[in-house]
Amino acid sequence: MPHRVAAIWPVNHTLRYSRNIAEALRTETIGGFVMLGATLVALVWANSPWHDAYESFRHHTLGPSWLSMDVAHWTSSGLLALFFYIAGLELREELTHGELRNPRQAALPAIAAFAGVALPALLFAAVSAGVPGALGGWAIPTATDIAFALAVLAVAFPSCPAPLRAFLLTLAVVDDLIAIAVIALFYTGDLAPLWLPAGIALIVLFGLLQKRGIRSPWVHAPIAVLAWYCVFRSGVHATVAGVALGMLTSPRQTPDDRRTNAEQADHVLRPLSAGICVPLFALTSAGVALNPSALAEVSADRVALGVIVGLVAGKFLGVFGGTWLAVRLGLARLGDGLLWRDLAGVSVLAGVGFTVSLLIGGLAYADQDQVTRVTTAVLVASAISAVLATVIFRIRVRRLKHSGAPAVAADAG
């Protein structure tokens, strides 16, 4: 019997992981379409005769005196903390059951992710060199928006092979980890000496209770909210608390085969994050003018051009070049079901940077006009990357149909 149990448990882990990933992919894909809708609403509203109402909505102040922020800051510091909590859950899941568990399997997407961060940053620095204060935004073109990317992939390549989708997901998880480390290290204001230790203590308490097997959300949720508030007051961006809490949420299975704490949190909170939090952030962040005058300002701004070059060219060259170099040097191998032509499409798709790029843009510059130009650049670059990736994948689908080869779709659960 022990031998049989030992043989069954890994299979159960694999099945649970595959089922959870399929559910997450469905939610994020739908969330990508919702976020796209919110972005379009923001753009139409900001370019309509009701532009002043849009700005009034963004800057409307909410909350008590000790936690008073306008709507735009609530979405970036409050709602996005939940988005990054989900990112923390994903990272822990990948480290526990996914590709990051196995160093040989993790090497390819990890190297691709690091190269896909470094090269866009270098290209941004090269294009914007000499502009006073420009280097503060070096991290803007380094992030990939997984929800938008999955939505584009669902439309352009519905029969996408499962290994390719897994590569994109793992790439985005590592990308998010790098992004949150960048935010913590480079975009932190003056630290408050008392609030930060209090936040760390609450995060540690949260982790200890998770480790002891406490399952009640009525215990964990108040501690998580207090930890978020302390980190927020500390000067560290509050989204850092979200990632830390997500990574400490327990993935340990129970004898009665109920959902783990991490699975339950993901099941309940991911739809809220993908369907409400991130779209609201898009609604309050993406409303920029798209008239000829505004676009001319973007084309003349080397910071904005650096963002566009970094996302469109840098992401492709970094992700695809990093993957090719890793395989060529023997640092990683191309997994079964992965083809170079498909990886080229995903590398272009990695240039769809939205949520984290807009967040970092707002943190990098104090000048609101510069933030607006950067926001426009992120939208333009993401649109270009999405269109190019769609063209690549549609050609791929057409060739598959013409050759009569069966397409291997990702497991939908």
Image (cartoon, grey):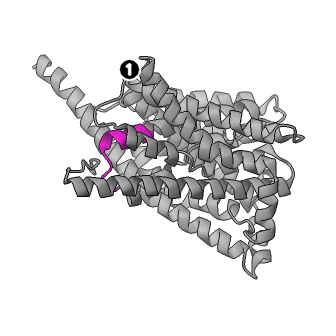
Residue 43 in the image: above or below residue 86: below
Residue 52 percent location from the top left of the image:
80, 76
Q: Is residue 250 left or right of residue 238?
A: left
Q: Is residue 318 left or right of residue 25?
A: right
Pick the residue in front: 25 or 266.
Answer: 25
Mark 1: amino acid = Arg
Q: Which element is circle 1 on?
A: helix
At 52% across and 35% down in the image, what residue appears?
319
At 26% across and 33% down in the image, what residue appears?
14
Point out the stretch of residues depicted in magenta: 158-169
Count the numbered circles shown: 1
Assess whether residue 273 is covered by the magenta stretch: no
| Residue 107 location, quadrant | top left
Residue 312 in the image: above or below residue 61: above
Q: Is residue 304 left or right of residue 357?
A: right
Characterize the magenta stretch by its predominant secondary structure. helix
Residue 243 percent location from the top left of the image:
57, 37
Pick the residue in front: 209 or 127.
Answer: 127
Q: Which residue is mark 1?
A: 104
Q: Check the image and name the residue furthest to the right.
A: 132
